[in-house]
């Protein structure tokens, strides 16, 4: 049929235009370690040095803060830094794994490589920062990191790449789909490809004018949840493009489906090229105030709580949640940071965060680390002291604040100017 033919032509055109390298694949430095080209901010240099320390690197800084001399160089150290580092481009003239991973990028943003780009979730983590933090808090292959406010799944992807197991929890079902597709769809690519032509053949106006018929079709075509979620996400990307940017739904669906499949192929290719052992990922809809895990059961926590009044996460994704058939009015009663108005909104947020921090303390092993990335916001003309509140309450629970790193942020509707990377250790 004509629509099927045009759809295939569009996919072939998109695939022919794909491919970009965010950094030049050239290493002209004679230093022991050279940083990646995108390391620009003070907080990144702070994290770089903390990462070096965690990886056992003794170093001296040279040449404008971008190159380093290693005073304890060895083949073993080169292997460790090359495999794990987030901020190094090369060590002893050899490109790091991370430098090669970030070449697998189908977007214009250097931070949206592999599957990170899938779905335009507001307030995403910086993946390079997360990789560094996983190293800084000493997580190793086979350890388990928890992200109780998983959001778009950045922690899950970066942990997976470092062979660290991850448990991702979020109260939003949209987030659970995102995280699952980004980390699990690589295991079912053959089945995804087997259904592609049939899915495309049904791109008819009457099908896509209905909010539920597409999902019923996907349910009929496969019983594999990973495959179903992949095709749900392909539709939700088109829903988002149409709602946010007024793009043609069908065109967006075809383009994004192709890009998603290509990104999965990239993930598999780099895994094989670098011989990466991937961590196990478990993602589920859950509540940070009542985590279904045993006491002292996780090796680390890296998370970014909802920024209370800075972002209305439900309103921001209302088009996708509606398309999935959820009652968004009912959801507002469950989400942290969107309940209540005025001063009561801040009070409810603080009470919810206390419960969440209690749960983090309970499930984290003693002498292990919890990283919380959070910032103060302006609400009704007043600054909400979320950072100070978090530090004091975590200390009261039995955490010790071992590092507080300021990080300037951009955008976010000017309600936030910076956020803090807070690194706590559970002492009791």
Image (cartoon, helix red, strand yellow):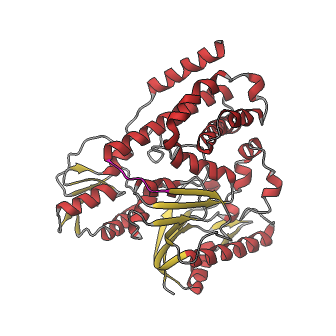
Residue 271 image point, x, y percent? 38, 45
Residue 92 image point, x, y percent? 19, 54
Main secondary structure type of the part rendered in magenta: loop
Residue 138 image point, x, y percent? 39, 70
Residue 345 image point, x, y percent? 77, 69
Give whichever of 203, 237 is nearer the camera.
Answer: 203
The residue sitting at the top extreme is 2
Instruction: Describe residue 83's horizontal placement relative to residue 32 as left or right.
Output: right
| Residue 366: in magenta span | no
Is residue 64 at least partly visible in the picture?
A: no
Give whichever of 215, 325 is nearer the camera.
Answer: 215
First to last magenta residue range: 275-280
Residue beneath the point at 46% across and 43% down: 114
Give the quarter of the figure containing the N terminus. Answer: top right
Is residue 10 at least partly visible in the picture?
A: yes
Instruction: Establish if 252 lies above or below 345.
Output: above
Instruction: Describe residue 133's horizontal placement relative to residue 259 as left or right.
Output: left
Instruction: Establish if 256 lies above or below 411.
Output: above
* Residue 83, quarter of picture: bottom left
Instruction: Describe residue 199's horizontal placement relative to residue 86 as left or right.
Output: right
Residue beneath the point at 38% across and 67% down: 46
Residue beneath the point at 78% across and 44% down: 325
Instruction: Establish if 220 lies above or below 290.
Output: above
* Residue 52, quarter of picture: bottom left
Instruction: Describe residue 44's horizontal placement relative to residue 1 as left or right.
Output: left
Total marks in image: 0
């Amino acid at each position: 049929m004509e629509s099927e033919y045009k759809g295939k032509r569009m996919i072939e055109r998109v695939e022919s235009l794909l491919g970009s390298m965010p950094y030049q694949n050239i290493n002209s430095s004679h230093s022991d370690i050279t940083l990646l080209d995108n390391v620009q901010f003070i907080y990144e240099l702070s994290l770089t040095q903390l990462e070096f320390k965690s990886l056992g690197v003794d170093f001296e800084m040279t040449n404008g803060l971008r190159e380093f001399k290693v005073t304890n160089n060895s083949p073993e150290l080169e292997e460790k830094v090359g495999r794990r580092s987030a901020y190094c481009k090369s060590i002893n003239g050899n490109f790091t794994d991370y430098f090669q991973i970030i070449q697998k990028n189908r977007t214009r943003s250097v931070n949206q490589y592999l599957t990170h780009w899938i779905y335009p979730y507001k307030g995403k983590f910086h993946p390079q920062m997360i990789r560094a933090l996983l190293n800084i808090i000493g997580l190793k292959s086979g350890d388990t990191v928890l992200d109780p406010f998983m959001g778009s799944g950045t922690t899950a992807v970066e942990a997976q790449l470092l062979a660290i197991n991850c448990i991702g929890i979020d109260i939003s079902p949209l987030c659970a789909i995102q995280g699952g597709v980004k980390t699990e769809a690589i295991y079912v690519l053959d089945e995804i490809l087997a259904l592609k032509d049939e899915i495309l053949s049904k791109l008819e106006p009457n099908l896509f004018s209905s909010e539920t018929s597409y999902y019923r079709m996907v349910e009929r075509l496969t019983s594999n949840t990973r495959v179903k979620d992949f095709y749900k996400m392909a539709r939700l990307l088109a829903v988002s493009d149409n709602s946010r940017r007024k793009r043609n739904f069908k065109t967006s669906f075809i383009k994004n489906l192709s890009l998603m499949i290509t990104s999965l192929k990239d993930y598999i290719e780099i895994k094989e090229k670098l011989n990466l052992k991937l961590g196990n990922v478990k993602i589920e809809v859950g509540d940070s105030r009542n985590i279904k895990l045993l006491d002292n059961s996780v090796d680390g926590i890296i998370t970014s709580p909802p920024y209370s009044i800075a972002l209305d996460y439900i309103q921001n994704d209302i088009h996708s949640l509606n398309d999935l058939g959820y009652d968004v009015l009912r959801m507002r009663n469950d989400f942290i940071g969107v309940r209540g108005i005025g001063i009561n909104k801040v009070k409810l947020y603080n009470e919810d965060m206390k419960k969440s921090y209690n749960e983090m303390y309970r499930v984290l092993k003693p002498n292990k680390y919890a990283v919380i990335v959070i910032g103060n916001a302006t609400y009704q003309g007043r600054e909400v002291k979320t950072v100070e509140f978090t530090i004091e309450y975590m200390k009261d629970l039995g955490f010790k604040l071992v590092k507080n790193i300021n990080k300037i942020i951009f955008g976010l509707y000017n309600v936030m100017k910076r956020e803090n990377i807070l690194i706590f250790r559970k002492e009791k």
